[in-house]
C-alpha cells in the first residue's frame, strides 16, 4: 500500500484544491451557514461556508449520537477519537465507529499523543484498538500542547517532537497502508511544525481567524473552524470542519484513500 501514500498529497494538489491560499478562489456572494453555531465567527469574510464538504469530529463528550440523522444533515465525514497515550481508550469509540459505519459516513480514528510515553508504546496501543478496515479515511495523529493535563505536561524540544511523530506515523502507515493525517493547533504548529512534514495532509484548528492567517505557509486539507457547532442528531455543541476542495475534489480524494 506504499503506492497509495505517495498518491494522496499529489492528488489533492493537482486538483488545485489543497493549499491554504487557493481556497479563496471559492469566494462567492454571502452564503448561509451550512450548520448552526452558538458562537459563530466571521473570519473577515473568508467563511468556511464557502466550502462544499463539511464534517465533524467526536469523542466521549458528545454523548449519544443518532448517526443516521447526522448523515441526513449533510455531514460528509467524521474523525472519531480512539486512543490517548499508551493506555487510554475513548469509551465511546467502538459505538461511534460502528454507528458511523452503519450510517455509511466516511470516518477515521484519531490518536491524541502524549509526550510522556514512547512512540512505539502509543502506536502499539492504537493498532490494538483501531480496526484495519477497508474504505476508511487515513488515521489521524493529534499533536497539541495540553497545559491542563493531570498526567503529562512535558514539552520536548522541536527536534524530539518531530522525531517521535515520525516514528509513530511510520508504524501506523506500515500497519494501515495509509499515510496519517496530522491534526494540530496554532501554538503547537508554531513551536514545532513550521516547514515540516510537507508530504502529509494537515488538519488545522483555526476558530478565530482563517488558516491562511495563522498558518500562512502551511498547505492544509481540513480546517476545524468551530467547537460550538450544532449538528442534528447530536445534543450539545460539536466541532465542525471543512475539506479544502470542492465536492468533486472530495470524491476523487475519497476514492483514492479508500483503495
Image (cartoon, rainbow, N blue to C red):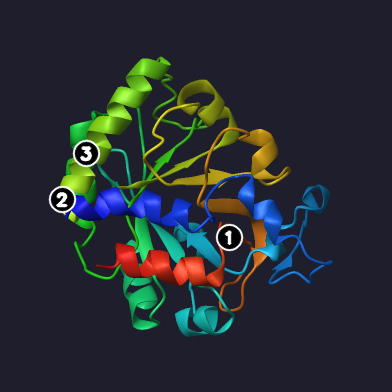
User: In which image quadrant can residue 50 be found?
Assistant: bottom right
User: Which residue lies at the image location 34% right of the left edge and 82% below the top edge?
Assistant: 102
Instruction: Please give the residue where the numbered disc 2 appears in the rendered image.
Output: 175
- Asked if residue 231 is positioned above or below residue 161 in the image, the reply reads below
In the rendered image, the quadrant that contains the N terminus is: bottom left
Q: Residues within 10 Å of mark 2 (few under 14, many from 20)?
A: few
Question: Which quadrant: the C terminus?
Answer: bottom left
* Residue 38 appears anywhere in the view: yes
Whole-angstrom CA distance, mark 3 to mark 2, is 9 Å
User: Height in image: 197 above or below 63?
Assistant: above
For marks 3 and 2, the one nearer the N-term is 3
Which residue is depicted at the point 19% across and 62% down?
Answer: 132
Q: Around disc 1, counting alpha carbons within 10 Å, would you say few (fewer than 14), some (14 to 19), or many (20 or more)? A: many
The residue that label 1 is drawn on is 242
Residue at mark 3: 170
Q: Nearer the viewer, residue 258 or 54?
A: 258
Work out whether 206 lies above or below 42. Answer: above
> Residue, x 35% and y 33% (percent of image)?
114
Q: Secondary structure at mark 1?
A: strand
Q: Earlier in the sequence, mark 1 or mark 2?
A: 2
| Position of residue 128 measured from the top left corner of the image (x, y, whole percent) | 16, 52
Q: CA distance from mark 1 to mark 3?
A: 26 Å
Q: Which comes sooner in the sequence, label 1 or label 3?
A: 3
Secondary structure found at label 2: helix
- The x and y percentages for residue 212 are 66, 40
Side of 102 relative to 20 (left or right): left
Q: Are marks 3 and 2 in contact (CB under 8 Å)?
A: no
Question: For this view, does 114 lie left or right of residue 219?
Answer: left
Amino acid at each position: 500500500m506504499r503506492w497509495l501514500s505517495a498518491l494522496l498529497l499529489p492528488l489533492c494538489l493537482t486538483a488545485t484544491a489543497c493549499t491554504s491560499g487557493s481556497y479563496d478562489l471559492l469566494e462567492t456572494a454571502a452564503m448561509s451557514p451550512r450548520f448552526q453555531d452558538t458562537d459563530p465567527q466571521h473570519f473577515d469574510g473568508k467563511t468556511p461556508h464557502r466550502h462544499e464538504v463539511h464534517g465533524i469530529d467526536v469523542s466521549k463528550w458528545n454523548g449519544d449520537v443518532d448517526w443516521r440523522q447526522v448523515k441526513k444533515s449533510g455531514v460528509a465525514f467524521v474523525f472519531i477519537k480512539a486512543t490517548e497515550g499508551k493506555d487510554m481508550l475513548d469509551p465511546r469509540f467502538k459505538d461511534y465507529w460502528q454507528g458511523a459505519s452503519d450510517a455509511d459516513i466516511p470516518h477515521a480514528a484519531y490518536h491524541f499523543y502524549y509526550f510522556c510515553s514512547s512512540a512505539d508504546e502509543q502506536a502499539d496501543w492504537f493498532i490494538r484498538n483501531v480496526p484495519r478496515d477497508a474504505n476508511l479515511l487515513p488515521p489521524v495523529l493529534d499533536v497539541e500542547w495540553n497545559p491542563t493535563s493531570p498526567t503529562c505536561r512535558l514539552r520536548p524540544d522541536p527536534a524530539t517532537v518531530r522525531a517521535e511523530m515520525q516514528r509513530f506515523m511510520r508504524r501506523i502507515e506500515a500497519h494501515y497502508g495509509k499515510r496519517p493525517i496530522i491534526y494540530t493547533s496554532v501554538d503547537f504548529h508554531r513551536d514545532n511544525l513550521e516547514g515540516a512534514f510537507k508530504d502529509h495532509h494537515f488538519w488545522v484548528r483555526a476558530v478565530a481567524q482563517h488558516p491562511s492567517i495563522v498558518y500562512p505557509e502551511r498547505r492544509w486539507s481540513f480546517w476545524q473552524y468551530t467547537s460550538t457547532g450544532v449538528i442534528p442528531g447530536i445534543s450539545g455543541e460539536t466541532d465542525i470542519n471543512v475539506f479544502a476542495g470542492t465536492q468533486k475534489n472530495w470524491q476523487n480524494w475519497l476514492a483514492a484513500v479508500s483503495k
